[in-house]
Image (tube, rainbow, N blue to C red):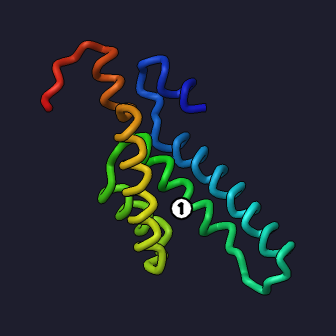
Amino acid sequence: MMIWTYGPGCAMGLFVPSLAVGAAYGQLVGRLVEAIVLAGGWSVNVNLHTYAVIGAAASLGGATRMTISITVLVMETTGAMQLIVPLMLTIFASKWYGDRYSYGIYDTHIKIRGAPFLE
C-alpha cells in the first residue's frame, strides 16, 4: 500500500498508509499475545486496540524517523495518556533500529531525486 501511494512521486501520502500497516501488524502481535495468554491459562486482559496503536506509532516512527512529534501526535489523537511511556519507548526503538540498518523514507527520496541535502 505504501509503495503505491509514495512511489509515483505525486502528493499521495505516506502518513496514513504507514499508520494502517503498523496498526494491522500491531493487531496481529496482540492476537498472538492473546493466544499465548489463553494457552497459558492466565486471566490477563489483552487490549488489542492498544497493540494496534503502538504498532501504528512504531511503523510511522520507523519510516519517518520522527520521534517526539509522532509520540505527541499519536498520544493526542488517541487521548490515552497512560500510553505515553510505551509510545516513547517503541518509537525510539523503531527509530534506533531503522537508523542502524537504513535511511529514512524521506532521506531516501531526497537522494533518489538528487536534491541538495543539508546534513
Please say if 79 is above or below 99.
below
Which residue appears at 86% of the width and 72% of the height?
39
- Residue 30 appears left or right of 113: right
Please say if 83 is above or below 90.
below
Question: Disc 1 designates what residue?
Answer: 54
Which residue appears at 56% of the width and 56% of the height?
55
Please say if 34 is above or below 118.
below
**Crowdedness near tag 1: few (<14), some (14–19) or many (≥20) residues, C-alpha within 10 Å:** many
Q: Position of residue 109 (x, y in %)?
A: 35, 23
Q: Secondary structure at mark 1?
A: helix
- Residue 30 appears left or right of 88: right
Q: Position of residue 49 (x, y in %)?
A: 64, 67
Q: Nearer the viewer, residue 48 or 78?
A: 48
Quarter placement of the N terminus: top right
Q: Amino acid at mark 1?
A: Ile
Residue extending furthest bottom?
Answer: 43
Picture quarter containing residue 89? bottom left
Q: Position of residue 92 (x, y in %)?
A: 37, 57
Quarter placement of the C terminus: top left
Q: Nearer the viewer, residue 102 or 19?
A: 102
Which residue appears at 35% of the width and 32% of the height?
103
Q: Position of residue 73 (x, y in %)?
A: 38, 60
Which residue appears at 41% of the width and 73% of the height?
85
- Residue 97 appears left or right of 42: left
Please say if 50 is above or below 24.
below
Give the tally of numbered discs: 1
Residue extending furthest left?
Answer: 118
